[in-house]
Image (spheres, rainbow, N blue to C red):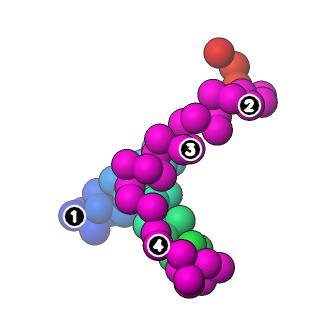
């Protein structure tokens, strides 16, 4: 039962974007090994700024 709850919690976190920064760090290190990795705060600031500047197909 505990394992199911953990998997469910992980899945909900994935839907909410909780794992996005960790995936970004892996991608950044692979594609830009010579550049410093932005902090998590910088990552979210830039991501929200990009979403606000080009809203695309958002409903609101």
Please state the horizontal and vertical placement of residue 17, each as a whole percent of the image.
48, 49
Secondary-structure class at tag 3: helix
**Mark 4 or mark 1, earlier in chain:** 1
Report which quarter residue 31 is drawn in. Answer: bottom right
Query: In the rendered view, would you say 36 is above or below 34?
Result: above
Q: Which residues are magenta?
A: 29-57
Q: Secondary structure at mark 1?
A: helix
Disc nearer the start of the sequence (1/2): 1
* Whether label 1 touches label 2, CB < 8 Å: no
Q: Is residue 7 above or below residue 59?
A: below
**Residue at 58%, 35% in the rendered image:** 49
Residue 39 % position (x, y): 38, 59
Which labelled disc corresponds to residue 33?
Answer: none
Q: 15 or 57, which lies in front?
A: 57
Question: Which of labels 4 and 2 is toward the front?
Answer: 4
Per the image, the residue denoted by label 4 is 36
Choose the circle earlier in sequence order: 4 or 2. 4
Instruction: Using the image, determine if residue 53 lies above or below residue 33.
Output: above
Rendered position, 25 above or below 10 = below
Q: Which mark is residue 54?
A: 2
The residue positioned 46% from the left and 69% from the top of the image is 37
Q: Which residue is denoted by mark 1 in the rendering? A: 2
Residue linked to disc 3: 47
């Amino acid at each position: 039962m505990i394992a199911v709850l953990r998997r469910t919690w992980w899945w909900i976190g994935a839907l909410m974007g909780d794992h996005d920064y960790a995936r970004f760090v892996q991608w950044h290190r692979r594609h830009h090994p010579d550049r410093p990795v932005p902090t998590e705060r910088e990552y979210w600031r830039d991501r929200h700024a990009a979403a606000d500047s080009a809203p695309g197909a958002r409903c609101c």
